[in-house]
Image: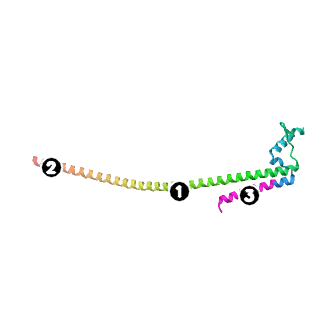
């Protein structure tokens, strides 16, 4: 099975488990509207800050609102349940799109890596061939220097012999 599909399924399972736990808590306690209703959360936070007047909680501006009751918790939860499902699907789709983008990027990187690896191998081969050629040329230069040195010594020896022979001839003629 594709790793991306498994990851997506596991993510959706985790979200479903969290969702089920919250649903169970609402069913058991019935006072968890503040988790799903931001307006009720604000009211509860205000109540916890120490306000003692109940009318402060029921009025916001010119309009009046009621503090959520036990009977409204199920309807608020079901409304928020649909909203949570939509958000869950949006998050799931974002996750899938992100995973697909990551997979495409990974494939592009692998392709580029293979291309660069081939190019690197070709350059290494070329470098080793050039190093070998340099070694051969260096050995040839050493050999040529030895040959030139030998030729120079031989030429000097011949010149000194010829000079010696001329001196002998000059002495013989002078006598």
Secondary structure under the numbered disc 2 in the rendered image? helix
Mark toward the viewer: 2 or 3 = 3
Residue 127 belongs to magenta span: no
Identify the residue under disc 2. 168
Can see residue 52?
A: no
Q: Position of residue 126 (x, y in %)?
A: 44, 55
Within the image, what quadrant is residue 42 found in? top right
Secondary structure under the numbered disc 3 in the rendered image? helix
Q: Earlier in the sequence, mark 2 or mark 1?
A: 1
Identify the residue under disc 3. 13
Colouring scheme applied when the structure was drawn? rainbow
Please report the bounds of the magenta region as a residue range. Answer: 1-22
Identify the residue under disc 1. 114
Mark 3: few, some, or many residues within 10 Å (few <14, many ≥20)?
Answer: few
Q: Residue furthest front?
A: 63
Q: Position of residue 128 (x, y in %)?
A: 44, 55
Q: Position of residue 149 (x, y in %)?
A: 29, 51
Q: Residue furthest bottom?
A: 1
Residue 3 belongs to magenta span: yes
Up-down relation of residue 60 to residue 75 (above or below) = above
In the image, 146 versus 20, the foreground residue is 20
In the image, 130 versus 9, the foreground residue is 9
Secondary structure under the numbered disc 1 in the rendered image? helix
Give the main secondary structure of the magenta stretch.
helix
Disc marking residue 40: none
Q: CA distance from mark 2 to mark 3?
A: 115 Å
């Amino acid at each position: 099975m594709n790793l991306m599909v498994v990851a997506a399924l596991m993510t959706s399972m985790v979200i479903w488990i969290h969702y089920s736990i919250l649903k169970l808590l609402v069913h058991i306690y019935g006072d968890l509207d503040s988790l799903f209703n931001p307006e009720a959360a604000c009211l509860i936070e205000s109540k916890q800050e120490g306000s003692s007047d109940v009318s402060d909680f029921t009025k916001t501006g010119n309009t009046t609102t009621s503090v959520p009751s036990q009977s409204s918790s199920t309807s608020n939860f079901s409304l928020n349940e649909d909203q949570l499902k939509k958000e869950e699907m949006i998050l799931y789709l974002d996750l899938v799109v992100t995973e697909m983008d990551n997979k495409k990027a990974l494939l592009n990187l692998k392709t580029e890596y293979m291309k660069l690896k081939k190019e690197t191998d070709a350059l290494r081969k070329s470098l080793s061939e050039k190093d070998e050629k340099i070694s051969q040329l260096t050995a040839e230069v050493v050999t040529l220097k030895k040959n030139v040195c030998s030729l120079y010594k031989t030429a000097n020896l011949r010149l000194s012999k010829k000079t010696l022979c001329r001196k002998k001839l000059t002495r013989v003629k002078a006598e």
